Amino acid sequence: MKIINCAKLMEYSKHYVLFESSTPYVAEITDMMPRKKWLLVGGLMLWALLPTKLFAAAHPLWFSPFISSQFALWSAKEFAQSGDWFDCAEEDAADDAKNNAPLFCSDKIVIHRTPMYALVSFASNHSPTLSPTLTLSSDFSLVHFNQLQLGLRSDGFQLVNIELGGESLDIEKALSKAPATLVDKQVQQFLQRYRASEPRLLLWQTADRQHLVEWTSDKNGIQLVYSLTNLPFNPH
């Protein structure tokens, strides 16, 4: 997977959040607070005026390390001992069970006000220090679609790449050729050609390049895969 240098995106991120903001989508959102409806109608530039921290929410202890390097990742043992998780690894009778990679599942949880199911996987039982991968899954709805993107922004993630409708947009590359305001307009025009339920792949990344989220969604559901890169931050 290509790792993006997010330093160039930091200024741009002040102007951009990935909301469906065209009238047909706003009209369908019936259970959101009036203020959020207004945000959607107002479009992307309005978001730049609102401090992200206003929307920051408390997270479970196990979740925080997937969005910030200030917290220590849980080990497989800690997940196993937690009452919120259960071992869901499928053991092949033909193999030694000790060779199976640890895999933990949760009952329904709430992340960014969205009901989701979570799965944490470790690549190998022989590499207990290897960073785990977190997968969050939810049903599709316009409310979930917007709440989760708002949540990613509040957690410090920046959108760095879009694949949608057979097209792709590398935002960092676009920023190297045009001002942020023009790129913002280009992104809005690109997104507004498609309904929120259109299949898409979005790559989000923190400014320190340590945390990635791969977003996939369509009319059937939304899936977020959190992973760590362990790459040094290069501001240039």
Image (tube, grey):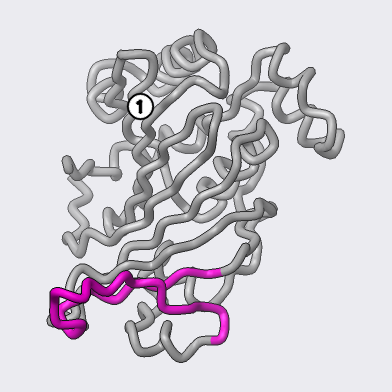
Magenta segment: does it hold 92? Answer: yes
Above or below: residue 123 compared with residue 165? below
Instruction: Give the residue at x 55% y 23%.
Output: 197
Position of the C terminus, as image quadrant, is top left
In what element is the residue under mark 1?
strand
| Along the line of sight, the residue nearer the viewer: 108 or 95 | 95
Q: Say few, some or many: other residues with alpha carbon within 10 Å of mark 1 (under 14 / 14 to 19 / 20 or more).
A: many
Is residue 112 positioned above or below 102 on the image?
Answer: above
Residue range highlighted in magenta: 83-106
Measuring from the top left, give residue 169's x and y in whole percent. 31, 21
The type of residue carrying mark 1 is Ile
> Where residue 123 sits: x, y (%)?
20, 68
Asked whether 63 or 58 is in front, the reply is 63
Q: Is residue 27 above or below residue 210?
A: above
Hey, which quadrant is residue 25 in on the image? top right
Q: Which residue is mark 1?
A: 162
